[in-house]
Image (cartoon, grey):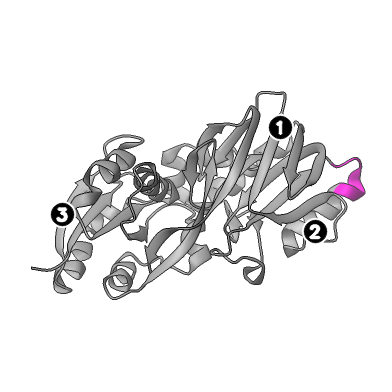
Amino acid sequence: MGKKLLLIINPVAGKMKSKNALFDIVKVFCDHEFDVHVKLTARRGHGTEIAENEHMNYDLIVCVGGDGTLNEVVRGLVRCGAETPVGYIPAGSTNDFAGSIGLSLNIKQAAKNIAVGTPVRLDIGSFKDVCFTYIASFGAFTSASYSTPQTTKNAIGHIAYILEGIKDLSTIKPAHIKAEADGKLYEGDYIFGGIANSTSVGGIVKLKKELVDMSDGLFEVILIKNPKNINHLNDIILSLMTSEYKNNKSIDYFNASEIKITTEEKLPWTVDGEYADGSGSFTIKNLKQRLTIIK
């Protein structure tokens, strides 16, 4: 008998390709002699429950959905200390994580790659003891991930995030943040902050691939200051367009394995595209090579 594979599918993710391609996905794995069992998520957080409660019965867990679906599965495994390898078939709207590690966006091809792939160890993050696979962020463009209606995401995909991000620009309220990392304090009024292990945040804030090592135990941290005049704003826009952040006085850019964040105001964050409360004082940690993914 072949290896046992648990296929966790989010039936409403992205353009709902997972429904249409279910037969193809299962056939690919059966052709490679996997013993496939299918579970559909029924609500938010269900992927976490399934992974946590059933991982011990399988050699491999493959999730089909968006980055949020992957986050749920990884969260379930981390919460119970499991080391089960994970395969990811991206079927979401933006698929930042998939793009960062070079996964195929063709569902059938992604399944084939997992079936014959090799395990790779990747870093993940911990935000208030809740894990994330690629990004924790606040401010401009952040709410686009969780406030854009699912129907809009399904209809027009990535452009939905861009349109929602543009709406943010007229209502940005800077947050006063203290960020401590490696004995250095970064403090200011910031309109955006991202602690990332990825080359893309919602397809809007991008990092050059050569700057991102997803298994080195370090985050790429970007803190964009509140622009004081039109020149500062133009400098920020240029950096976003060129992905050049290091020599811009309006941006704090650095690498860190652990960041202590302090803010006195109620501040919404997004963790892998889902809302999170980022108020008070807390620490974001890099869990070096904690995730085994098949690619």
Which residue is at the front of the view, 49 or 215? 215
Under mark 1, the amino acid is: Thr
For marks 1 and 3, give the CA distance.
Answer: 44 Å
Which three-letter amino acid code belongs to the residue tagged 3?
A: His
Q: Nearer the viewer, residue 167 or 119?
A: 119
Residue 140 visible in rendering: no
User: Dot 3: what SS?
Assistant: strand
Classify residue 6 by image quadrant. Answer: bottom left
Does residue 4 appear to the left or right of 69 in the view shown? left
Which image quarter holds the N terminus? bottom left
Q: Residue tagged by mark 2?
A: 238
Residue at x 66%, y 62% (from the top left corner): 207
Residue 82 place in picture, x, y as percent: 33, 50
Provide the secondary structure element on which disc 2 rests.
Answer: helix
Extreme top residue here?
Answer: 265
The part of the chain drawn in magenta is 227-232
Please report whichever mark, 1 or 3, sits nearer to the chain's N-terminal start.
Answer: 3
Mark 1 touching mark 3, by CB under 8 A?
Answer: no
* Residue 37: image tag: 3
Quadrant assignment for the C terminus: bottom left
Which numbered dot is residue 35?
A: none
Location of residue 159 in the rendering, given as x and y in whole percent from the top left corner: 55, 51
Kindly identify which residue carries mark 1.
Answer: 262
Camera-nearest label, 3 or 2: 3
Q: Is residue 12 above or below residue 4?
A: above
In the image, is residue 9 part of the stretch drawn in magenta? no
Q: Kindly report the distance in space between the C-alpha atoms of the residues bearing marks 1 and 2.
A: 29 Å
Neighbor class of circle 1 (other Cα within 10 Å; few <14, some 14-19, many 20+) is some
